[in-house]
Structures are given as structure tokens and as C-alpha cells.
Image (cartoon, rainbow, N blue to C red):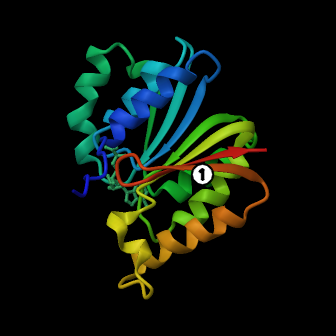
Amino acid sequence: MTQPMPRLSVPAALALGSAALGAVFATGLFLGTFTGYSALALALALPPAGRVVTCEVNPGPPELGRPLWRQAEEEHKIDLRLKPALETLDELMDAGEAGTFDMAVVDADKENCAVYYERCLQLLRPGGILAVLRVLWRGEVLQPQPRDLETQCVRSLNERILRDARVHISLLPLGDGLTLAFKI
Ligand SMILES: C[S@@+](CC[C@H](N)C(=O)[O-])C[C@H]1O[C@@H](n2cnc3c(N)ncnc32)[C@H](O)[C@@H]1O
């Protein structure tokens, strides 16, 4: 009998992983906030002076999550930037924050995922972790001919990460696929 692939929500996967990382991680970068549930999971795992810069273009969803950030007494750690993620990444670079983040999570639009990967890698410190979410893209990445631009972008980023000598990687079958890239 075929067993279904284990499913774990993105926030649950992040909470699980980040809980183990809190002791040594203090700064996080999150691309694709949506309601901010995952950004909250990350903030909860960081020490009291921790900081999560989280990027979102749509102002609606984070307003649903913000009361929970407050209720959890984590709002002070969450720095929400409501604009295209690329603009925020450029601002962080211009502010001299390259090489300072402990962890980055990429879960925004797939069309820009390769650029997000490059910028996040620059912003991470050596030893930092880059988490790229939804890398299996519902299995579509296995199609010999990707059917749409998003699938092409996810697949080509997967291939790029596989060949990238700047990182060690682990692809976990959690949620819709989670790649952890450890910056060397
Ligand atoms: C898949 S959802 C993120 C889900 C969220 N990480 C979670 O675990 O609940 C992708 C999010 O990225 C946002 N997004 C899309 N394009 C963006 C961009 N250029 N800059 C920042 N956020 C973007 C969308 O509005 C959406 O909320």
C-alpha cells in the first residue's frame, strides 16, 4: 500500500526547527510574511533581544496576525516591512547589514526566488541558515517540461543551490519541501 508523504505545515516545520536554534540565533529575515504566523514562530525561538525583519507586499494578512504577535508578547521583535521584498533587501544591504543575519526564510513570490536566494546569502553570516520553502512545488518540479513560470523558477533555483559551493544543503520532505542551505 502506498503511504502518503508526511505533511507538516510551514509554521509547524519552522517552529520545530527554530525552537532548536534559539540558543544561538538572534536575527532572522523572512520573505513572504502573509499573516506572520511563521514570523511569530521564528520570533518565539529567538532570545528577548532577537529581531525578525519580515517582508510582505500585501498589508491585509499581517494585520490579521499582528494581534497574535502582541498576545504572545513578541511584537517588539518583529520588524514588518510592507513593500516588495527586493526593496527591503536592498535597504538592508545599503544599511551595511550584509553578513549579519543568522537565518533567512524565502517564501515570497517564486518569480524572484533566485534573486532572493542571492541577496539573502549575502545578508547571512558564515554559519547562517537559509531556508527555502515549497521547493517541491506540489511535485511539479519533477515534470520534464515545467508547465509555468513559477515551476521553472523553483526548479532552476533547486538546480542552482545543488551546484552552489558556498553552501551545504539538506532537502527535507516537510510541508511542500524545505531546503536548508548552511552558508559556509
Ligand atoms: C506563500 S505566502 C507566505 C506564507 C507564509 N510564509 C506562512 O508560512 O504563512 C507568500 C506571501 O508572499 C507575499 N509576496 C508576494 N510577492 C511579494 C513580494 N514581491 N515582496 C514581499 N512579499 C511578497 C504574498 O503576498 C504572500 O503573503
Residue 95 visible within the image? no
Q: How many marks?
A: 1
Q: Is residue 135 above or below residue 70?
A: below
Split into 4 quadrants, where in the image is the C terminus?
Answer: top right
Pinpoint residue 14: horizontal percent, then vertical percent. Answer: 42, 35
Closer to us: 121 or 12 = 12
Residue drawn at x 65%, y 55% is 119
Residue drawn at x 56%, y 33% is 28
Residue 124 visible within the image? yes
**Amino acid tagged 1:** Leu
Mark 1 CB lies closer than 8 A to ligand 1: no
Q: Is residue 68 above or below residue 80?
A: above
Residue drawn at x 73%, y 51% is 167
62 displayed left or right of 109: left
23 displayed left or right of 55: right
66 displayed left or right of 119: left
Label 1 element class: helix
Q: Is residue 180 above or below residue 16?
A: below
164 displayed left or right of 137: right
Residue drawn at x 31%, y 41% is 8
Split into 4 quadrants, where in the image is the N terminus?
Answer: bottom left
Pinpoint residue 27: horizontal percent, then vertical percent. Answer: 60, 28
Residue denoted by label 1: 89
Closer to us: 27 or 135 = 135
